[in-house]
Image (cartoon, rainbow, N blue to C red):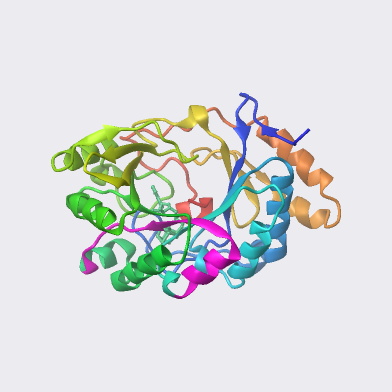
Amino acid sequence: MNAVLQDGFGRQIDYLRLSVTDRCDFRCVYCMAKNMTFLPRQQVLTLEELQRLARLFVGQGVRKIRLTGGEPLIRPGILGLCRDIAALPGLRELVMTSNGSQLGRLAGPLAEAGVKRMNISLDSLDAQKFRAITRNGDLEHVLGGIEAARNAGFERVKLNCVVMKGRNFDEVPALVQYAIDQRIDISFIEEMPLGDVGRSRGEAFCSSEEVRALIAKSHPLLDSTENSGGPARYVRLEQHPETRIGFISPNSHNFCGSCNRVRMTVEGKLLLCLGQDDALDLRQLLRRYPLDDQPVISAVQKALRGKPLRHDFTPDTEVQIVRFMNMSGG
Ligand code: SAM
Ligand code: SF4
């Protein structure tokens, strides 16, 4: 019989989001504080440990792994790691979330290494606003990266956009048009209260309903029951069948009932829920039992029985979880 990871509520866990670094070349205002300190090297999982964890989880029934961070493409050795994970027997797909800054040079090699789908963050099409949101990102680089990803042979390229009032809400129609022109999907995400980023999140909060109403002014929308294995709800554009619009609404539309995933931080903490503090320190176990997988597997199975039912984000709350998104593996 195939192994299956199950939580205490009977949800099957077949999706692992694996953070390969907490570092990033951007400092997005919703994700990080202006001055961040990053983990000392000895606290970060080695490439071998990351690969071992991926193998253990796939052996326990995980079918999809998303590499994330921080910015996964600034981790030295990322291509070899992708190759090793993609080759694991039983894994259905290796996918990645990136800010796009390195994709101009890495999109082709990543597709060759076995990465199937690529999600790219894009919050603005205005170079100045883009820089203001990312604090130091270069829009042209990212647009070049998206172009390279479209030509690299991934099965799907998708855009992610965190919408904030006063920053990029007014750009939603232009971002939709860009996705239509590129014939790719775009998801709009509600900002989550993770970490103290030095500003009030409530003021900029923008619900998926508001984003949807804005898009509907220029495009007739068709509801869809499609699911890509993540938390997004999709609509289709009547006149542009090649582009789907996703809404990820952690605050206004709880999606925990069908949660099929866990996250691994780059220090080896297994986060059972993005919106709760429950975690299991696997780095310690990996290092204590370098040649014996069973203690690690047993600890994961036991911890999963305590996976929380749901997160408690609400639109009007400020910071609830102290850890930043780059530490959580977004
Ligand atoms: N650096 C990569 C990137 O930006 O795509 C991958 C890591 S990033 C943490 C993953 C995703 O989390 C991005 O799409 C980002 O927009 C999103 N994100 C970061 N902080 C967030 C927050 N506080 N609320 C909602 N989404 C957030
Ligand atoms: Fe970096 Fe991604 Fe966080 Fe932006 S959202 S600071 S690109 S990890």
Q: Quadrant of the N terminus?
A: top right
Q: Does any portion of residue 141 appear in the rendered image?
A: yes
Chain part drawn in magenta: 105-127
Taking the spot 65% from the left edge, 25% from the top edge, the residue there is 8
Residue 255, picture quadrant? top left
**183 vs 77, nearest the viewer:** 183
Q: Residue furthest bottom?
A: 105
Instruction: Please provide percent x and percent y for residue 186.
Output: 33, 49
**26 vs 91, nearest the viewer:** 91
Q: Does any portion of residue 166 appear in the rendered image?
A: no
Taking the spot 31% from the left edge, 54% from the top edge, the residue there is 183
Instruction: Please provide percent x and percent y for residue 197.
Output: 37, 54
Taking the spot 53% from the left edge, 33% from the top edge, the residue there is 259
Instruction: Please provide percent x and percent y for residue 274.
Output: 51, 41
Q: Is residue 208 left or right of residue 268?
A: left
Instruction: Please provide percent x and percent y for residue 220.
Output: 18, 37
Q: Is residue 191 above or below residue 130?
A: above
Q: Residue furthest right?
A: 291
| 296 is within the stretch colored magenta | no
| 124 is within the stretch colored magenta | yes
Q: How many tags in the picture?
A: 0
Taking the spot 31% from the left edge, 37% from the top edge, the residue there is 235
Q: Residue furthest top?
A: 9
**4 vs 208, nearest the viewer:** 4
Q: Is residue 122 left or right of residue 48?
A: left
Q: Residue furthest left?
A: 217
